[in-house]
Image (cartoon, rainbow, N blue to C red):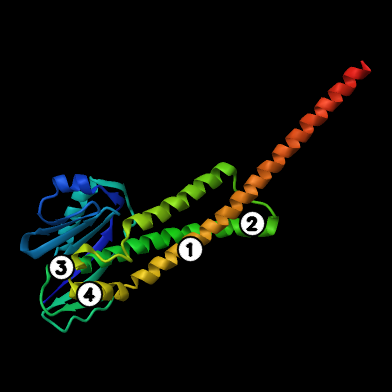
Amino acid sequence: MSNDAYAIQVADAISIKNCKLDFKGTLLFSGTDELFYEKDNEQYIYIFKYGVICFYNVEKNETQQITNQILQFSKNPLQDKLSDQIEIFVGNGDGEITPGYVNLPEFSVDKLRLIMLNISQSVALDSYALISELILEETNTHTIYLEEKGKLDISGKKLKKYIGKVLNIKNKISENLYIFDSHDVTWDDEILNKFDQDLKKAFDLKDRYRSIQDQIEVIKENLELFKDIMFHRESSKLEWIIIILILVEVVNMFVLKLV
């Protein structure tokens, strides 16, 4: 027997508090960042505050209905939705884990939850990777202009907004993803802990996370350079203003003496 776990990012964020008050289903786990529900016929829904919903054993038309229901508690719904899925075989094999399927000797809600958690984080990483790549490309256009023209093509206010945008993305990644942390369900169970680590390896989560962090650091270094250049330029302008004011004052004194 096999069913798919299907994860999709529907928004920038989902209000877990508001969703918990309204969503219908048997709540198996509740946290500040996530909600794990069981619905009819062994259907499971995992909702994350970073805008990802994961479904298990839910028909496609029903996933759309549930998504629409949850979207009313979301912030900045996305038009282009990233998604991923993995096939889960139960009663088949010896626990083999690959990016495309997982074999479970027997059904386990805890293992299912870990599978849904990791594929959801994989989708979130895809989203953050796309954003960081776009920002890096935009940053490179400014560095190329600096190389060719010897000056920046970005104003002070625009640069400040740009720095804020990068810092917000970095904070989102750090706040919402638990790539390096063992989930609480694994704390007292070595088997579940190993299962979780194997899932992280299969989805290559840690390396992808580090790659995004490295890109963000490169962008930050470039922005620090841009900021220093901008401050130097503003400082030079201020120095010239002071020099001109002094010259005007000297000319006025000279004219007054002549008169």
Classify residue 157 by image quadrant. Answer: top right
* Residue at x-position 27% and y-position 53%: 49
Q: Is residue 176 above or below residue 157?
A: below
Q: Is residue 131 above or below residue 95?
A: above
Q: Earlier in the sequence, mark 4 or mark 1?
A: 4
Q: Earlier in the sequence, mark 2 or mark 3?
A: 3
Q: Are marks 2 and 4 in contact (CB under 8 Å)?
A: no
Considering depth in this image, is 111 or 52 the residue closer to the camera? 111
Q: Which residue corresponds to mark 3?
A: 110
The secondary element bearing badge 4 is classed as: helix
Label total for image: 4
The secondary element bearing badge 2 is classed as: helix
Mark 4 vs mark 1: in front: 4
Mark 3 vs mark 1: in front: 3
Q: Which residue corresponds to mark 1?
A: 215
Q: Left or right: 243 with respect to 61?
A: right
What's the mark number on residue 89? none
Mark 2 vs mark 4: in front: 4
Q: Earlier in the sequence, mark 2 or mark 4?
A: 2
The secondary element bearing badge 3 is classed as: helix
Give how far apart the Cα atoms at labels 4 and 3 are.
10 Å
Q: Which residue corresponds to mark 2?
A: 145
Q: Which residue corresponds to mark 4?
A: 195
Classify residue 259 by image quadrant. Answer: top right
Name the outermost residue toward the front: 188
